[in-house]
Image: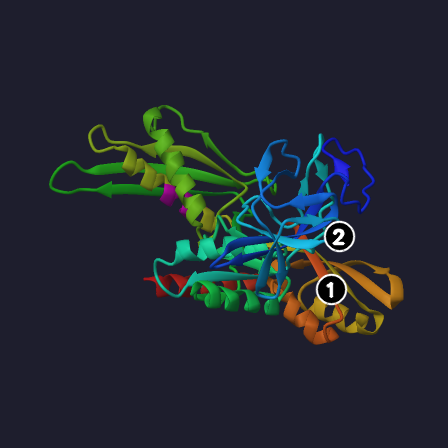
Amino acid sequence: GTTADAAEVALRADPAGPLCAQVFKVVADPYVGKVSYLRVFSGTLPSDSSARIGDDRRETKFGTVLRVQGKETQPLAAAPAGDIVGVAKIDDLAIGRTVSSGQEPLIMPEPAMPVPMYSLALQPKTRGDEQKISESLAKALDEDTTLRTTRDRQTNELVVSGMGDIHLTTLLARLKRRYQVEVDTKPPKIPYRETITATAEGHYRHKKQTGGAGQFGEVYMRVEPRERGAGFEFVDDTFGGSIPKQFLPAVEKGVREALEQGVIAGYPFQDVLAAATDGKSHPVDSKEVAFKIAGRMAFKDAVLKAKPVILEPYVNLAVTVPDTYLGSITGDLNSRRGRIMGMEAGAGGAQTIRVQVPLAEVAQYNTQLRSITGGQGTYSMEFSHYEPVPPHVQQAIIQSAARGREEEE
């Protein structure tokens, strides 16, 4: 183990030594509550005692120490070094945490966990079950540190990630059995982006006349592509007060709304400069709302003339397989628009192929890899960058987005 300041300490399995135990398993029992299982490496953990958790110098009160045999539990007076025991209802006892006593907290190295690669988006079957799902998933994550949950900010989907389809199928069955939570699942949406590849100009006049006061705002706008990752910039290139200064923030707000909503397929827009170049106003009918609408629509008009493209996320994928499957895997990755970046020979005749590939092509790669290798392959991936999609893929994405909007309407 180590102390809080990273000094290494040798531990002996001595019941009389300083207490050092580590959590290796957590079970969220619907009747008992959270039960944490510990292995005692050194010292003794008595029932109804106090000890430190992790590097916290404050002590936490421990209740009865339990010997667990299947579903049966037996209270113990104490757990000496070498014992494996359970303790109930201590929220801070997560997998990998260390329990210690003595003058300095002791910390055992946490076990290295594989990174989850297979993801599903969850939707409650019953309306109003969102809170119930979140609470049950939080308990599941306590039990299994190879699970991850995220709320995708772009798609607003609740996404759960694990080691594979069987792993997540087992998780969902457990949620249904324990907490009566049922969900529909689907592959997570791919976080596409939109941008432009050329400079263009657009224009929109917003004029609305009703019985009372009207609305009027007219905006001319130029859009220019920016370097990847440069983000959005709005500039005022008007002159002579063609758009009164007090309405320019409304024009920018309208453009920012269009950035969020997307223009060609409903995905967030990025890396573009929008310049208001000219416009007209009315002394009575010009209002902020009119210039916000005119700004948004002038931006969209310009974008459609500026050779817009959809960007897709690429990942760095590392696939390790026995060398007998090397040809099959490289052929499969090439068919997924992958670019082979290199290969490395490993122990036991294993080969690791490194490839850059669109996320859309490998989002469910766990299933395909198992099918090709009979379960003998492993892989890892991490986000790399965004690139424009090929024209035929872009057309398919736009058509899919249009169908989605029609279904929502």
Could you tell whether 384 is left or right of 155 in the image? right
Q: Nearer the viewer, residue 119 or 70?
A: 70
User: Considering the numbered disc 2 on the image, is that residue within a helix, a strand or a loop?
Assistant: loop
199 vs 178: above or below: above
Q: Quadrant of the C terminus?
A: bottom left
Identify which residue is drawn at 36% across, 23% down: 240
Q: Main secondary structure of the magenta part?
A: helix
- Location of mark 1 (residue): 378
Image coordinates for residue 353, horizontal then vertical, percent: 78, 61
Residue 390 visible somewhere in the drawing? no
Image coordinates for residue 132, horizontal then vertical, percent: 41, 56
* Magenta region includes residue 298: yes
Q: Earlier in the sequence, mark 1 or mark 2?
A: 2
Q: Nearer the viewer, residue 28 or 210?
A: 28
- Location of mark 2 (residue): 82
Could you tell whether 250 is left or right of 66 in the image? left
Q: Tell me where residue 351 sits by quadrant.
A: bottom right
Image coordinates for residue 356, horizontal then vertical, percent: 71, 57
Numbered label attached to residue 400: none
Image coordinates for residue 371, horizontal then vertical, percent: 68, 75
Query: Mark 2 belongs to which amino acid?
Result: Gly
User: Considering the numbered disc 1 on the image, is that residue within a helix, a strand or a loop?
Assistant: strand
- Neighbor class of circle 2 (other Cα within 10 Å; few <14, some 14-19, many 20+) is some
Q: Quadrant of the N terminus?
A: top right
Could you tell whether 297 is left or right of 321 in the image? left
Residue 88 visible somewhere in the drawing? yes
Query: Mark 1 belongs to which amino acid?
Result: Thr
304 vs 11: above or below: below
The magenta segment is: 296-302
- Neighbor class of circle 1 (other Cα within 10 Å; few <14, some 14-19, many 20+) is some
Identify which residue is drawn at 77% across, 37% down: 2
